[in-house]
Amino acid sequence: MNQLAAFLAATCTTDDKMTPSLRVDQFWHGFVLHTKPHADFWAAHGRFIHHVPDRGRHNPEEGLKALALTGWKIRAAGFTRAGRLSASKRTDRS
């Protein structure tokens, strides 16, 4: 769940295309189904990011680059990643 929060918060800091990990994508699907909290989240952040499924038409090399960019954007937004599948808000700003 922390990784979903980190991913969504980071999407609010950029107009670049971001790609969630499979685990984040699964949590995001669940979040979208809870329409009131989902709408409230985006209203609080002043924008709305649409979930656009890939449908398997991507280039694997481009996908890896997009995941790497996403990881960088998550860290730039002040989050750290513990391994590949989780993230938590950094408490130190050094």
Image (cartoon, rainbow, N blue to C red):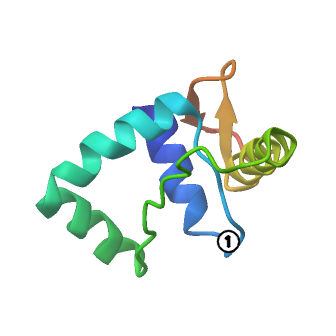
- Residue 33 percent location from the top left of the image: 18, 50
The residue carrying pointer 1 sits among few (fewer than 14), some (14 to 19) or many (20 or more) residues within 10 Å by Cα, namely few
In the depicted view, which residue is nearer to us: 87 or 68? 68
- Which quadrant of the figure contains the C terminus? top right
- Residue 7 percent location from the top left of the image: 55, 48
Total tally of numbered discs in the picture = 1
Residue displayed at 56% across by 51% down: 54
Residue displayed at 87% across by 41% down: 61
Q: Secondary structure at mark 1?
A: loop
Residue that mark 1 sits on: 14
In the image as oriented, which residue stretches furthest toward the front? 57
- Which quadrant of the figure contains the N terminus? top left
Asked which quadrant contains residue 81, the reply is: top right
In the image as oriented, which residue stretches furthest toward the top? 83
Above or below residue 66? Residue 27 is above
- Residue 60 percent location from the top left of the image: 79, 39
At label 1, the amino acid type is Thr
Residue displayed at 85% across by 46% down: 65
In the image as oriented, which residue stretches furthest toward the bottom? 46
For residue 86, side relative to residue 33 (left or right): right
- Residue 63 percent location from the top left of the image: 76, 44
Residue displayed at 43% across by 79% down: 47
